[in-house]
Image (cartoon, helix red, strand yellow):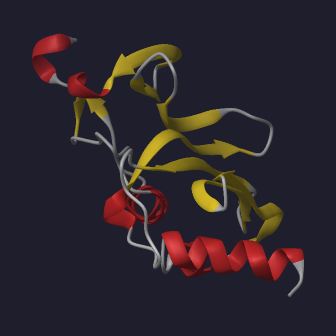
Amino acid sequence: MSETNRSEYFFDLVYPGLLDSLRALGGLFVSGPSHSLGTRGDALNRIELKVKWECDDSNQVTIRVTNRLKVGVSEDTFNLGQWTRSFYSYDYSQKLNSTHFRIDLDSHSEHVHLLPNLKDHVPVANVDPDVRDIDPRQFVEMVATFRSTKVYPLSRKANLK
C-alpha cells in the first residue's frame, strides 16, 4: 500500500468521511494527507493526521490533529471513543496565510482565532457557537457553510465583548 493510501486509510479509520467532505469543497490536496503513528511496545497509542486542502477559490483548509489512546485502554479494533484528541489545529485561510478563522487545542489552551483580531487567543468558552472539542468534520462543515452563505460562523459571546 502506498504511503498516500496508508494515510487515507488512517483518516478514514479515525474520521470517516472527512476527506470526502474536503473533496466536496472543490479543489485539491496541496499537502498530505499524511500520518504519523506512535507506539508503546507493540501497541499503537498515538495517531497524528495532517492535511492541507486548497479550494477552487484559492482559500485553504488545514487540519492537524493528534489522538492518543486513553490511559489504561488497550484495543484490538479502533474505537474513537477510546481515544482523546491531545492536539488540534483547524485553519481556514486565504492562500497567502491571511486566516479567516482558526480553532486550536495546544499545550496552553483550547482557543479560537477570529476576526477582527486574529492574534487574540479567545477561549472557546467565550465563543458562539460552542466549539469545544470540535470534530474536524464539523469544522469542514463550518467552512462549507461559510463559503456558501458568507455569514461568519464564529463570534465572541455578547456579554464578553
Q: Quadrant of residue 74?
A: bottom left
- Residue 78 visible in this rendered orientation of the protein: yes
Quarter of the picture containing the C terminus is top left
Looking at the rendering, in which quadrant would you find the N terminus? bottom right
| Residue occupying image coordinates x 57% and y 81% | 20
Percent coordinates x, y for residue 30 in the rendering? 84, 61
Residue 146 occupies quadrant: bottom left
In the rendered image, residue 56, in percent from the top left (x then y), is placed at 72, 69
In the displayed image of the protein, which residue is found farthest to the left? 159
In the displayed orientation, state which residue is furthest to the front. 41
- Quick check: 117 above or below 142? above
On the question of residue 25 being in view, the answer is no
Considering depth in this image, is 112 or 101 the residue closer to the camera? 112
> Is 55 left or right of 83, judged from the image as shown?
right
Which residue is more in the foreground, 18 or 27? 18
Q: Which residue is drawn at 51% across and 36% down?
A: 102
Furthest residue in direction bottom, as rendered: 1
Number of callouts: 0
Q: In this view, does 125 lie above or below 11?
A: above
| Closer-to-camera residue (145/138) | 138
Residue 85 pos. (x, y %) = 44, 46
Answer left or right for 80 relative to 128.
right
**39 to the left or right of 113:** right
Q: Which residue is drawn at 48% across and 79% down?
A: 16
Residue 116, given in percent of the width and then of the height, sits at 46, 20
Name the residue rendered at 29%, 31% in the picture.
Answer: 155
